[in-house]
Amino acid sequence: MTETDAGPKPAEASPPRSMKLGERLIDSGLVTPDQLNLALREQKRTGERIGEILINLGFVTQEQISSVLASQAGVAFVQLDSYLIEPSALKTVPEALARRHKLIPILLEPPKLTIALANVFDMVAIDEVQRVTGYVVDAVSATESGIAGAIDQYYAGGVSFEEIVQKSIRQVEAGRLSEADMAAGAPIIRLVDQVFLSAVNDGATDIHMEPEERIFRLRYRIDGKLRMGPSLPKILQPAVTARVKILSSMNIAETRLPQDGKINFYYGKKKIDLRVSTLPTVHGENIVLRVLDKSKLVLGLETLGFDENTLARLRKAIESRNGIVTVCGPTGSGKTTTLYSALAYINNVDRSIVTLEDPVEYELPVIRQVQINVKAGLTFSTGLRSILRHDPDVILVGEMRDAETVELAIRAALTGHLVFSTLHTNDAAGAIPRLINMGQEPFLVASSLRAIIGQALLRLNCAACREEYEPSPDILARAGLSPDEVRGRVQRGNGCPQCGQTGYRGRVGVYELMEVTPEISRMVMRRANARELLEAAMAEGMTTMRQDGIAKALRGLTTLEEVVQLT
């Protein structure tokens, strides 16, 4: 888009365009009038942009808004994470200008320079780029987070990680400094920052700092699997450990007891939270940092990967006015995201929603969230008692981990409340025997439960290197498939730099949903085991996680090996 094409656009960049954006989203079928009205009320309270509020409420994604704005401006929308940016284009625009106007150059075809903008109506930015570069500017639309990530990735330069390590070693060897003084030195600060930024860039969910006898090893959990990171010299262990503990407000003098803390920092426009935990070992303090990237939390039941049948049944369950809907699965299987998406789906001004969480990982607008504090006496059971006195319609209990909490959740469900919670069982059918084993009467379980969701996360095939393959006879037998059923339909990643040579990049959920029907209720009353409950649910039309995973594998999303291993 050149300057002359875009002459009349600045008027649309003024505040009234916020309403136009809402109307365009309604016209596109992405939001309802009620959802827009809720967002406008929230805007009056917070003063935030309407687009940000709609995203935070889980009504739309950033990509959907950017796509609508691009359509409104008559320009293309690009996904920068899958776009190869030309080095020659990058050199035309200084980093400071790119960050100030939230843009990045992506293609140079003299006399035209194509730039990706978060706000394609920003004529001031387009004019300045044309003046600085001397090229005619053509604008395309991209998400703000995508541009920030691309700037950090492509403009990063200068000193390598190895050079930072060498400078850190020289700092430590320079003199007898305290751990706190070493941790405050520029090389150690930059070293720890680089570890954090590498984890965010690679999409890691956890950073492991592991002391050994001779080295200080780093590992990153990416797509559910640990990958080796750099191994630091042992001499840097005290300074790096001290730096992390200082950032997370821990006592650096205490090395004999476990400690917990939290670190917050911004990466571009993204706010990153790190949950930090230390554990004394024979070779020093082991540190694990849980990476919570709020920009990656995409709320919306349609985005999670449910098949149409399961999604319809889930919507029916969460639209109930009372009862318990519980999500089951191992740690790290995305249960919190599923629960938050369910809350976003039913969130409205006519409902009072309160949550009890440990910890509150992501903050949700409008919904009141309570952080568990065991040391202060605020447990799930005590918190649930208090919540019931605050006239809630919907309650989220982060986990039903003891008999008292389960009893209170059942009592809340039977007295007209809709309760969401989680259980640590491997599948949906195992939840019912677990609740009974926790001391609940079968008739109470049968009358309070509405639905049980079982879920797991499978690694996605890398889009850059996936290719067709023939699974082994053993895998086919375990999946219950014949060679003819999979021929030409299954794929796997061959390994490339984009996926770290693993063949996988990203994850997708596989789900099953057991509705507590009259038949299931009768079986619960007679204490049927998990296998009997599973068979009955399948006879009533339930799709299991294994079946869901096989369907996704036959669409080329993941491998059959991944499906049979994790379901």
Image (cartoon, rainbow, N blue to C red):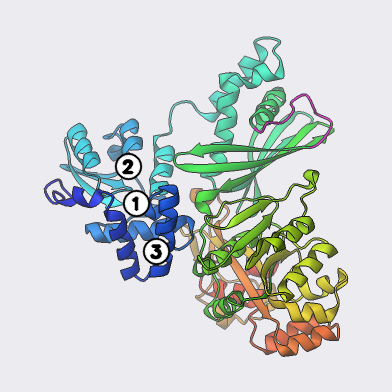
Q: Give the Cα distance between marks 2 and 3.
A: 31 Å
Instruction: Please identify the residue farthest to the left as the structure is shown.
Output: 4
Look at the numbered discs 2 and 3 and tell me whether their residues touch, using CB distance below 8 Å.
no
Residue 142 image label: 1
Earlier along the polypeptide chain: callout 1 or callout 3?
A: 3
Q: Residues within 10 Å of mark 2 (few under 14, many from 20)?
A: many
From the image, tell me which residue sits under label 3: 36
**Residue 425: percent from left, percent from top:** 76, 67
**Residue 203: percent from left, percent from top:** 55, 48
Q: Is residue 253 above or below residue 70?
A: above
What secondary structure is found at the residue carrying circle 1? loop
Instruction: Tell me if 517 is positioned left or right of 50 in this view.
Output: right
Which segment is the magenta one? 248-258
Quarter occupied by residue 88: top left
Q: Give the Cα distance between marks 1 and 2.
A: 10 Å
Q: Give the Cα distance between marks 1 and 3.
A: 23 Å
Q: Can the viewer see residue 428 in this picture?
A: no
Look at the numbered discs 1 and 2 and tell me whether their residues touch, using CB distance below 8 Å.
yes
**Residue 563: percent from left, percent from top:** 64, 69
* Residue 228 within the magenta-colored segment of the rendering: no
